[in-house]
Amino acid sequence: MISKFIYKANIMKKLALIALVASVVCGCAKDDSDTLKMITEATFPPYEFMRGQEIVGIDVEICRAVARKLDRKFQCETVNFDSVIPAVISGKADVAAAGITVTEDRRKNVDFSDPYVKTGIVVIFKKADPYTGPDCLKGRRIGVQGGTTSEAYVLEELKQEPERSTSPAESVAGLKSGRCDFVIADVDPARNCVKGEDDLAISDFITSEEYAVAIRKGRPDLLKAINDTIAECKADGRLQKWIEQYTAEADSQKDK
Ligand code: GLN
């Protein structure tokens, strides 16, 4: 168990080192570049997912609106979730938006915008082997997407090793094939994963979390543009419209 905490401490040290080096030598993502680069992880409907070759979703719309406000072009790239925050620290991208939960650990390495959604993680279970509370997870095989708050929940709250995957859907495939007994994931991708799966269900929230956009520390103009954009999108109804539109689109992809 001690090794898990050493593992985590090592990751934190590596991130801090990248942040330090980036602040000294970085020349990639700058406030005066003509393109705002977004980094995400596009297996997370309805916040980001693939429509053919295109990355679409609520987070993409928010960041596109930031680019428009700054009068810059917009680019979006997808990587594994555990590479999303390092990409803004190193300057490979300007804004990270991937249903990223604000946590104190992450705050040591990046600045967060104001939150734009209140949410949390849930347990996905087989109706034949229902989730009855945290105790029923102890000693069972629990699938999570690597690098997420779901992984942290298994390591820190349950004090056990999770079965890691690269997406909520891959974890749920593991639940169906018997590779794990439960899956923990954020509520919206979890709902999308169980849609049409009559033998699966999801629990109530087991944590309370908020999503925000992450950027490299020390970019106050960019942070203000993001916060102003989020406030405007909330006030004029665009955020709510995107939530409804992309939830429906992601659900309809499952019907095909
Ligand atoms: N909200 C979770 C986190 O920040 C999961 C995000 C994701 O998998 N895209 O860890």
Image (cartoon, helix red, strand yellow):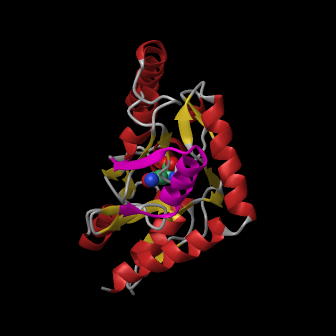
List x then y, in percent, for residue 29.
Answer: 44, 30
Q: Quadrant of the N terminus?
A: top left
Q: Tell me which corner region of the image, top left, top right, bottom left or bottom right, holds residue 118.
A: bottom right
The residue closer to the viewer here, 90 or 120, is 90
The residue sitting at 41% across, 41% down in the picture is 84
Horizontal and vertical percent position of residue 182: 40, 65
Residue 243, percent from left and from top:
57, 70
Q: For this rendering, which residue is in front, 214 or 106? A: 214
Residue 217, compared with residue 96, is above or below; it is above
**Does residue 152 appear left or right of residue 168 in this picture?**
right
Check if residue 82 falls in the magenta segment. Answer: no
User: Is residue 97 depicted above or below 42 in this figure?
Assistant: above
Q: Is residue 50 left or right of residue 112?
A: left
Residue that appears at 70% across and 47% down? 228
Q: Residue furthest right?
A: 235
Residue 98 sits above or below residue 176 on the image: above
Magenta stretch encompasses residue 76: yes
At 53% across and 30% down in the image, what residue appears?
A: 31
Can you say which quadrant of the picture contains the C terminus?
bottom left
Q: From the viewer's perspective, is 235 left or right of 247?
A: right
Res 22 → quadrant: top left
Please state the extent of the stretch shown in magenta in the rendering: 55-78
Residue 208 in the image, given as x and y percentages of width and height:
65, 56
Q: Nearer the viewer, residue 162 or 91?
A: 91
